[in-house]
Amino acid sequence: MVDGATPVSSGVTFPAPADARQRQYLGLSAGAETFGLADVQADWLVVEVFDMYCHICQQSAPALRRLHDAVQKAGVGDRVRFLGVGLGNSPLEARAFARRFKFPFPAVPDRENQLRKLFPRLRASTLLVFHRQGDARQLFTRHDGLLRKKDADELAKKIIEAVRSAGASSSSSSES
């Protein structure tokens, strides 16, 4: 089981997006067939866990886009990547959900519910935010259930502040 102090590394893989732009967005090689969370080339990774048939997930989609847009507008989007993971969904279902709800980022299927190896009580309608720690990812924060506009705004502030703080500390330590 993973908590905020436990790094998330390998063991859970997803099929790489077929679209070359989506693979590039995630920092995957052109020939990548699968990838893990640690393979995404970004300091921060926001994972939206959804199920195509989940009404709460459907209701959360506009707030999720709002969160994504706030991160982009704050100028830290180059350090933060977003990924949708369709818990129990087929590739077709994951793509259909992302298209229907206009995800501005890749969505991949997790047909075998692999994320539950890391988070045994995980359910659809969960947002996970990870920070890179060496070769692994560490859970930074988590939001379960309906993501409302207010929740998205609070999460955006928290993520943006953490990204900027991490950037400031890494640049000041490299200058020493």
Image (spheres, rainbow, N blue to C red):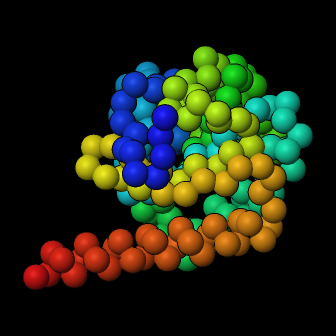
Whole-percent x and y of residue 162? 46, 71
Which of the 4 image quarters holds residue 53? top right
Whole-percent x and y of residue 107? 63, 37
Q: Residue at x 87, y 50 (%)?
A: 59
Q: Nearer the viewer, residue 21 or 116?
A: 116
Residue 34 in sight from this viewpoint:
yes
Whole-percent x and y of residue 28? 39, 37
Query: Is 106 placed above or below 173 here?
Result: above
Q: Residue at x 81, y 62 (%)?
A: 148
Residue 95 in sight from this viewpoint:
no
Q: Residue at x 40, y 51 (%)?
A: 5
Whole-percent x and y of residue 104? 66, 51
**Left or right: 154 in relation to 99:** left
**Left or right: 29 in relation to 129:** left
Q: Nearer the viewer, residue 130 or 7?
A: 7
Which of the 4 image quarters holds residue 175? bottom left
